[in-house]
Image (tube, helix red, strand yellow):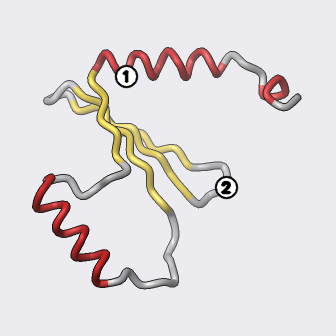
Amino acid sequence: MKKCFDCSCGCEMMSVELDYDNNEIYISFWELGDKDTKTKMSHKLRHIKYILKEGNPYSDQICFTTDEFKKFRDFVNEISLIKVNDLNP
């Protein structure tokens, strides 16, 4: 099960995915749009090295166990009760 959420500015996106097999929840952040700049070769090689060493190419991914996700969920539920106007004095 996977759900995506767009940033209100339209530049980024967050995806939340439930992995039933590993009993984990993944949260990833994505930058949207086509960038005019090209990635430097040194960055590409560093990325390849990271993939070979760690096995996961995404440094912006968060993996939650069920218990950790429940803490995250509870926090989001708690802050969702705060009125936006109360945040700006």
Q: Is residue 75 left or right of residue 89?
A: left
Image vertical order of residue 34 relative to residue 60, above or below:
below
Q: From the viewer's side, name the closer residue of 29 and 18.
A: 29
Q: Residue 34 in the image: state x and y as whole percent.
A: 49, 76
Image vertical order of residue 1 relative to residue 35, above or below:
above
Q: From the viewer's side, name the closer residue of 48 and 32.
A: 48
Locate the C terminus and report the quarter of the image it occupies. top right
Q: Is residue 79 left or right of residue 41?
A: right
Residue ID for mark 1: 69
Q: From the viewer's side, name the closer residue of 5 and 57.
A: 57
Q: Residue at x 37, y 22 (%)?
A: 69
Spatial CA distance of label 2 from label 1 is: 26 Å
Q: Residue at x 11, y 57 (%)?
A: 53
Q: Amino acid at mark 1?
A: Phe
Q: What is the tally of numbered marks visible in this picture? A: 2
Image vertical order of residue 29 relative to residue 80, above or below:
below
Residue ID for mark 2: 9
